[in-house]
Amino acid sequence: MTAKPQEPSVEKVTTEEYKYGFVTDIEADSAPPGLNEDIIRFISHKKKEPKFLLDWRLKAYQQWLKMKTPEWAYVHYPPIDYQDVIYYSAPKAGPKSLAEVDPEVLKTFEKLGVPMEERAMLAGVAVDAVFDSVSVGTTFKKKLGEMGVIFCSFSEAVHEHPELIQQYLGSVVPYNDNFYAALNSAVFTDGSFCYIPKGVRCPMELSTYFRINAAKTGQFERTLLIADEDAYVSYLEGCTAPMRDENQLHAAVVELVALKGAEIKYSTVQNWYPGDKDGKGGIYNFVTKRGACRGDSSKISWTQVETGSAITWKYPSCILQGDNSVGEFYSVAVVNNMQQADTGTKMIHLGKNTKSTIVSKGISAGKGQNTYRGLVRIQPAAENAHNYTQCDSLLMGDKCGAHTVPYIEVKNNTAKVGHEASTSKIGEDQIFYCQQRGLSKEDAVNLIVNGFCKEVFRKLPMEFAVEAQKLLSVSLEGSVG
Amino acid sequence: MLVIKGLKARVEDKQILNGIDLTINPGEVHAIMGPNGSGKSTLAHVLSGRPGYEITGGSVTLDGKDLLALSPEDRARAGVFLAFQYPVEIPGVNNTYFLKAALNAVRKSKGEEELDAMDFLELVKAKLKPLKMDESMLQRAVNEGFSGGEKKKNEILQMAVLEPKLGILDETDSGLDIDALKVVADGVNALRGKNRSFLVVTHYQRLLDYIVPDQVHVLAGGKIIKTGGKELALELEEKGYGWLTGEKVNA
Ligand SMILES: Nc1ncnc2c1ncn2[C@@H]1O[C@H](COP(=O)(O)OP(=O)(O)O)[C@@H](O)[C@H]1O
Ligand SMILES: [Mg+2]
């Protein structure tokens, strides 16, 4: 294997530095680090919240104090000092339109390749950008407003639609659901809110770009999305973050509610800073995402492409309450270098004739560890429930790992549950085959990896699919010798 | 066009090629025959730059250019095409997409304009017909679930699209029934021309009834031990390789 013309095989760690590594310098109006009831009151006061919300936050906080970090996931990191985290920071002036947005903020978006105005106009996408815990721009609101669609920052919704917040907040992910969800419930600063009225098909993809800024600020978004009867919405969430030395905690909660006949498509491309080659820095991404198919014949579909973060702990789930409701989970999770991901889904079948599909594609490179963890539970009342699970792992090199942990609980014997799993190594022979046809090694790897992920990518909206493919190639650059 | 001098190569400490000399002029078809394990595939792989082989001596030039100094993709772009003995499956990658990416990579390297989807489709459909391949093959994943015969035809389709200078066919005939063999041979013959050469590796004389070679070489123990005209293939068919290698070997 030493002759000069032939290339050496297998891994050489990535040399690609994080592309989006830069920090915006913006004066933050921050709370002191640490967490106690006063901090929660401070946040709630800053945001001029109604009492019910403050009370709810405080209940969550009390609950959180009694809870422990979950330790069952296959991820390892030093303990987090929650008293060292800043729970609130905001740009000083609260801009009401794009024109008022700090030019530096806009510049940052541009560096990220997200020229908001342009992107919004060209792609017909409404953008609700969360920048440092406070929403700075909401476009296309008017057009959506005419259809009765509400799409705004969470704080705005708290003021303008408190009855919806009160009715639905915590109805899918209760404040005491788990350690991170409880923490989020206590200290969340902002996020997105979306309501699609009865019978309305939202005519555009709703899109949110998240960005973490200001050193040492935990980011605790809260997203609540409600599709009323026979409504339809496709929602996109994407993010990328600046280079950072210290680990950043991110604990978001996303709640989806689909009423009778409604359909929600929720797509995520996650590209937070994964840390350097040695695993230094990088985002800790502990997210609780759950959707309730509350009405009959409703449908919730999660599609995620997870390439970033040092640690990912995330299980977008569906509670299939309504008869004939459908839950889907399509996932691509990539780990490279020292990244760790423990991700999957929970499909809880409660109603009759409920159906769920799980397609998980895990790619491991470098020294990355990738775990699929999935639960399929068929409750006694769920007559004729169906589940199909497919779980494939692709290994690049031999220092990485892939793990599959399926939990299947069937309490009704009319259920049909099918599980398929595979693990393969990216083949030197596949790469050579492509090269022999004239493709470069990098192109060959991208082609093979994209082929592996195809079933998931085809579920993404067009422009997102293109972005996802690019992300994948950046994430894996240099991972095969 | 292709000049191989004293080529020696080994795999994992096992010397396989022991000094190969071979010159193929433009437009010529050379056949390489030889017993199992004699190094035929190794020669094909070394010429196309497959990783894992160590070149321990000799040289290979294509139109005067040092082939061994090039990466596999640069060899392909320079006009070396290998029809694999065992074509590889690439799940999820559309056959058309793959071929278009390959053709455009080759074109780009030559400073030619890349083809758009429409033009490419027209081109590939025209190449499909003589190979009696169904258009649905284009929409399937590269070689995935293809029958043995379909895989071999797909290799020839790729060659027809990429129009190489040198086509190396590694046992393209193995696993083909007689009808498929004729179709494949016709496909290759249609590509013959004064600027395109072929190195046809085969185990059986049968293929050479259809693709008539200018020269036949016998490879044994990593060396060319005999060279002759197309009659040599017939002679081998009759006598086996034993009379050349001095051992009893089954053809
Ligand atoms: N990767 C490898 N490792 C070890 N031995 C190999 C490898 N590839 C080929 N060989 C050996 O090299 C010899 C020639 O193989 P090959 O070129 O495939 O022969 P042919 O194509 O003529 O049947 C055989 O003895 C084979 O076992
Ligand atoms: Mg062989």
Image (cartoon, rainbow, N blue to C red):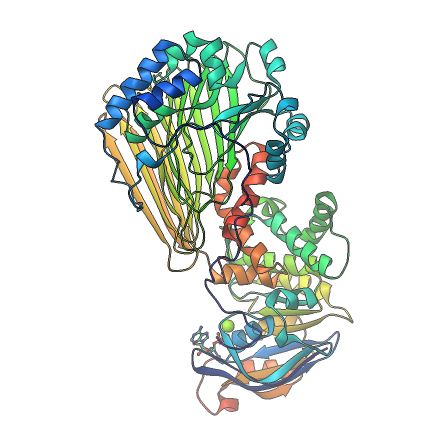
The number of callouts visible is 0
A48 vs A83: above or below: above
Q: Residue at x 60, y 81 (%)?
A: B234
The residue lying toward the viewer, choosing from A259 and A357, is: A259
Q: Residue B63 falls in which quadrant of the image?
A: bottom right
Q: Residue at x 62, y 76 (%)?
A: B68
Q: Position of residue B208 (x, y in %)?
A: 63, 73
Q: Is residue A378 visible?
A: yes
B5 vs B120: above or below: below
Position of A268 with respect to A339 (left or right) is: right
The residue lying toward the viewer, choosing from B167 and A340, is: A340
The residue lying toward the viewer, choosing from B40 and B190, is: B40
Q: Is residue A297 visible?
A: no
A115 vs A321: above or below: below
Q: Residue lying furthest top in this view? A: A163
Q: Position of residue A64 (x, y in %)?
A: 26, 26
Q: Position of residue B93 (x, y in %)?
A: 55, 48
A75 vs B143: above or below: above
Q: Position of residue B165 (x, y in %)?
A: 71, 69
